Image (cartoon, rainbow, N blue to C red):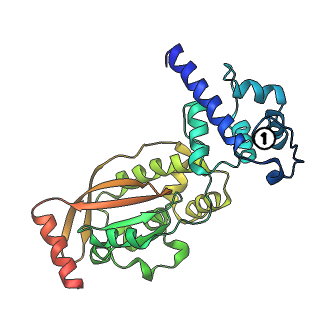
Amino acid sequence: MSDDQRSETRRELGAFLKSRRARIAPRDVGLAGDVRRRTPGLRREEVALLAGVGVTWYTWFEQGRDIQVSAHFLERVARALRLDAAERAHLFALAQNRPPPQAPGPASTVTPPLRRMLDSLPGPAYIKTARWDVLAWNPALVAVFGDLARIAPAHRNMLWLVFADPEYRGTMSDWEPDARSMLAKFRLEYGRHGDHPDFVRLVRELSDASPEFRRWWPEQDVLGAVEGVKRFRHPVAGEIEFEHTTFMLDHAPDLRLVVYTPLPGKDARKVRRLRQSLA
């Protein structure tokens, strides 16, 4: 980033912070109002007080001075200014040129439009959380891999199915490279949420259940989201090849849509016949 770009970003940051504090009335955050104040909303020192940070440091930050601030500082400022998720992400982008740390909150909802879109896909597809828990799946997935409803909700997790469910593991023609790839991709999510007890518990349970997981997890392999081809074995249709793609959901950034598209030709025909037989 050039010096001019950094200067413009700092000006944008200052304007954003000023606009956010201007919309908060002192009485809304438990501070005494002053009818003679010339500053709309909160003053800088009041934001610093609410955030628990130094007044001088916050003032320099809002003025766009070339200082380094931590994620902890930004989180405090975001809470003090009552920023929503989009505003918090914008603050981190302006201050650090990167998205904020992700923290799992209440489970996101699979909305009716999302459910209808999922059901309309011709290939197997499902929606998973950052912890890789499966929230929803479509009829094509049931036809090819079986109904996930028969699996206990506590184990309705893609990593658990791959490493600890013998039936699901048996459907994977290239189990070891595919399992290693999934583990390396999950490592990224674990890095963002590793202090959350649900993630810690999942890793502990998988380490107890799978010797491969226990052996590979300490290797620290990391892999970004990639597209590719996976092969699965069906007891009736035989081997089927799929292209797999993962999408972020705009309204729920903690969820992912995973789609398996059968390769054109015989693989697509096999999936179509399996769906017809299920219907």
210 or 60: which is nearer to us?
60
- Give the image location of residue 34, x and y in percent: 88, 43
Q: Is residue 172 left or right of residue 274?
A: right
Disc 1 secondary structure class: loop
Find residue 17 and report its horizontal and vertical position in percent.
Answer: 67, 36
Q: Is residue 217 above or below residue 158?
A: above
Q: Quadrant of residue 19?
A: top right
Residue 203 horizontal side relative to residue 263, left or right: right
Residues packed near mark 1 inside 10 Å, few (<14), some (14 to 19) or many (20 plus): many
Q: Quadrant of residue 107?
A: bottom right
How many dots with numbers? 1
Indicate the amino acid at tag 1: Leu
Relative height, residue 60 to residue 200 (above, below): above
Q: Which residue is mark 1?
A: 42
Identified at 63% across, 31% down, the residue is: 15
* Residue in the foreground of this view, choosing between 67 and 205: 67
Q: Decide which of 57, 235 is in the foreground and name it.
A: 57
